[in-house]
Image (cartoon, rainbow, N blue to C red):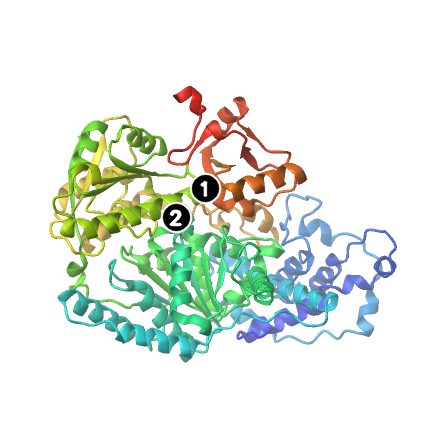
């Protein structure tokens, strides 16, 4: 395992030597000879680390202790005050059998303590909160190095002495393909020229040294391609080991991976790591490739990775061996964060600080990519790393105006019937609402050619419906150029929740968006006149007469819609984010680890990880038999009573706990003792409406 940080390399070598010395106990040797006894061995190395390093440098000793003691069960809580039996402090006090025989075979090397102390002290400035954050980060990194090396050694020992191949990418060949793709675009129209000039701004700054790069580019300017070219050039010039492309929405993963695979072909073996994808279920891979990819999913031993923010940060802030294995492979990387503005406010401090620490201490670079850029420099300096080196890649925004495909207009409150009537005036309309039940009500009232999208529908049916919508829109363009003279019976109405804002590439004649935060309204507007072929396209912002709980996002956005002629302007976006972060200032550090711990000896690694949920959700999943494959998997679950939730991801609907309780009372769902709830009656699911809370017979 190669490491570019010499101070950490020395530390990890010693951790590796000490972690298994407890196996020198006689009882463990008896266990190795098949005697059925339970022996703790992992605390022994931690006791030696404590003895060797606690006096000269307490932080180093505790970092080693946490790593060694947790190398099987996960990094424990420190527990100086709570005295729990599984805490590090309690375990360190246990009397162990003699294991001193390790000294006859192992020589623990000297460490340059001053170098290590200087590395730990970097940036701290007597700030105890920052010390806790940095110590916890470095502990997780060193733990990652240990447990991945341990897992790989075990795999070699239990196998034939070899490991599956890493997934490889030829960065130079991929860069050449990106360049050819970019060169194939003609810069003839004003829009094409503006796109080329924006991209040139980015490429001209590839050589600038920084830790975090901000790429603020409007929708339609080629952000994805631009960011990948930038990342490839960085990786080649600075000898980075990998590129990690991080997205927020599962729905965007298919098109992102598909785009890269089509562009790079055999030059890139792209690792895809997300909760809704399994290499076991993928049919278009060889068995050898599948084995390599499954291993790479465990530790990210791949040159090019596409993953989600939930996977990325869920690993970075875990305490568990399985999740932390991949963290050391976040070092020496170019990290691209698509739609960076979507980092949740209540987790913003750990989000930004984790990225800042990777770039400062582990030799990575990060690119924040978005069309609606918050004031990240100020946020990073305040909450993550005071002197982080940040470069804005797009400083001239004068051409942004040319990428605007629609105007935004606030049309106030109205009844559902009025909204539907207005939408039917257009050849194709998209209505986006805040609640699933509202979407369903509107769909039931709507006449003509209509479609409904929400998480009441299984992902399988959502994809089917989106494919139908795209097909209808395409045919509409063929039959009625410029969408003129479209008869009422051919007009299309799509009614959706906000899920359609997550990178879904529809091109609608008009969009109606229920009042919400400005960022969501701008995302919805991105589905309007997406190709820019129509003049005067509109996104209308409305409120429904029904009661709706107000929040600060809605209040601020309503005011901005009245204040600004163009709410998509950089000035308006900046005002919105500044206000939101100011209003929610107390939430930004809500989940910082330093809130609960002020002493490195008592950091609750396990407790903190158990509370770290990037997506706070009160929803429950229900599996529905929406096709024959789904029904077969439900039958297998019923027979074996053994279930892997990942196998059902495409057939799952989201409901609230109250809705699930309602279905349970009606005996409409069953979990077969697995904890995976399955709908047992087709009467409670409709392929267009989704899951129903009263059977079809009752509704009819």
Q: Are marks 1 and 2 in contact (CB under 8 Å)?
A: yes
Residue at x 50% of width, y 26% of height: 663
Which residue, as the protein is rendered here, is positioned at the far front?
479
Number of other residues with Cα within 10 Å of mark 2, as a class: few under 14, some 14 to 19, many 20 or more: some
The label shown at residue 377 is none
- Nearer-the-camera pick, 684 or 108: 684
| Image quadrant occupied by the C terminus | top left
Where residue 153 sits, quadrant-wise, is: bottom right
Q: Secondary structure at mark 2?
A: loop
- Horizontally, residue 63 falls left or right of residue 700, namely right
Circle 1 residues within 10 Å: few <14, some 14–19, many ≥20:
few
- For disc 2, the marked residue is 344
**Is 404 situated left or right of 548 in this image?**
left
Rendered image quadrant of residue 685? top left
Q: Residue at x 58, y 46 (%)?
A: 607
Q: Is residue 603 left or right of residue 269?
A: right
As drawn, 465 above or below 29: above
For the image shown, how many numbered marks are present on the structure? 2
Percent from the top left, x then y, of residue 426? 16, 41
Residue 415 in view here = no
- Residue 47's x, y, as percent? 73, 60
Where's residue 690, x and y in %? 41, 34
Quarter holding the N terminus is bottom right
What residue is at 51 percent from the left and 61 percent from the top?
284
**Considering only order in the chain, which callout, 2 or 1, is on the residue closer to the N terminus?**
2
Q: From the viewer's perspective, is residue 476 above or below residue 622?
A: below
Q: CA distance from mark 1 to mark 2?
A: 10 Å
Residue assigned mark 1: 616
Residue 278 visible: yes
Label 1: which secondary element? loop
Please indicate whether residue 405 sits to the left or right of residue 270 in the image.
left
Q: Nearer the viewer, residue 19 or 343?
A: 343
């Amino acid at each position: 395992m190669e490491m570019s940080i010499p101070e950490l390399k020395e530390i990890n070598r010693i951790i590796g030597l000490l972690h298994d010395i407890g196996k020198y106990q006689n009882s463990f040797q008896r266990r190795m000879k098949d005697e059925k006894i339970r022996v703790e061995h992992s605390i022994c190395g931690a006791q030696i680390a404590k003895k060797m390093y606690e006096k000269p440098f307490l932080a180093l000793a505790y970092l080693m202790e946490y790593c060694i003691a947790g190398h099987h069960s996960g990094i424990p809580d420190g527990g100086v005050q709570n005295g729990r039996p599984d805490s590090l402090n309690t375990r360190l006090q246990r009397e162990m059998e003699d294991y001193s025989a390790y000294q006859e075979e192992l020589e623990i090397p000297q460490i340059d303590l001053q170098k290590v102390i200087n590395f730990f002290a970097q940036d701290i400035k007597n700030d105890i909160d920052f010390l806790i954050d940095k110590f916890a980060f470095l502990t997780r990194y060193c733990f990652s190095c240990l447990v991945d090396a341990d897992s790989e050694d075990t795999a070699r020992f239990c196998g034939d002495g070899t490991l599956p191949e890493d997934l490889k990418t030829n960065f130079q060949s991929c860069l050449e393909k990106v360049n050819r793709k970019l060169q194939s675009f003609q810069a003839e129209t004003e829009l094409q020229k503006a796109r080329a000039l924006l991209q040139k701004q980015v490429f001209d700054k590839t050589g600038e040294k920084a830790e975090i790069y901000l790429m603020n580019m409007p929708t339609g300017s080629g952000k994805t391609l631009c960011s990948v070219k930038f990342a490839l050039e960085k990786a080649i010039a600075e000898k980075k080991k990998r590129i990690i492309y991080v997205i927020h929405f599962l729905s965007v993963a298919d098109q992102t991976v598909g785009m890269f695979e089509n562009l790079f072909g055999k030059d890139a073996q792209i690792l895809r790591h997300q909760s809704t994808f399994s290499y076991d279920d993928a049919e278009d891979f060889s068995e050898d490739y599948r084995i390599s990819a499954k291993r790479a999913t465990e530790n990210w031993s791949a040159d090019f990775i596409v993953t989600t923010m939930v996977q990325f940060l869920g690993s970075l802030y875990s305490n568990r061996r399985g999740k932390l294995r991949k963290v050391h492979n976040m070092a020496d990387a170019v990290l691209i964060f698509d739609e960076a503005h979507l980092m949740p406010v209540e987790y913003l401090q750990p989000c930004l600080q984790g990225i800042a620490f990777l770039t400062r201490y582990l030799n990575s670079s990060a690119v924040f990519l978005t069309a609606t850029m918050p004031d990240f420099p100020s946020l990073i300096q305040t909450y993550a790393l005071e002197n982080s080196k940040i470069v804005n890649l797009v400083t001239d925004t004068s051409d942004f105006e040319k990428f605007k495909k629609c105007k935004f207009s606030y049309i106030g409150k109205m009844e559902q019937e009025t909204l539907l009537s207005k939408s039917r005036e257009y050849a194709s309309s998209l209505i986006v609402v805040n609640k699933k039940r509202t979407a369903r009500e509107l769909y039931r009232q709507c006449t003509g050619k209509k479609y409904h999208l929400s998480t009441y529908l299984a992902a399988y049916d959502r994809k089917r419906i989106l494919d139908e919508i795209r097909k209808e829109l395409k045919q509409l363009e063929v039959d009625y150029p410029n969408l003129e003279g479209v008869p009422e019976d051919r007009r299309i109405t799509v009614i959706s929740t906000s899920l359609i804002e997550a990178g879904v590439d529809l091109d609608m004649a008009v969009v109606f968006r229920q009042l919400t935060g400005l960022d969501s309204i701008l995302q919805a507007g991105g589905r309007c006149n997406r190709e820019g072929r129509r003049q005067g396209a509109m996104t209308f912002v409305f409120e429904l007469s029904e009661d709706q709980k107000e929040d600060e996002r809605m209040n601020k956005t309503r005011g901005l819609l009245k204040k600004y002629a163009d709410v998509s302007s950089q000035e308006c976006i900046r005002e919105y984010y500044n206000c939101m972060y100011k209003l929610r200032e107390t939430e930004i550090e809500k989940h910082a680890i330093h809130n609960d711990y002020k002493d490195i000896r008592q950091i609750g690694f396990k407790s903190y990880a158990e509370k770290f949920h990037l997506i706070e959700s009160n929803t429950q999943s229900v599996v529905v038999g929406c096709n024959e494959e789904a029904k077969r998997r439900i039958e297998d679950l019923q027979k074996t009573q053994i279930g892997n939730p990942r196998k059902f991801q495409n057939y799952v609907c989201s409901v609230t706990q109250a809705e699930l309780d309602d279905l349970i009372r009606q005996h409409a769902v069953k979990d077969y003792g697995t904890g995976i709830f399955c709908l047992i009656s087709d009467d409670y699911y409709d392929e267009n409406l989704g899951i129903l809370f009263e059977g079809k017979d009752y509704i009819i």
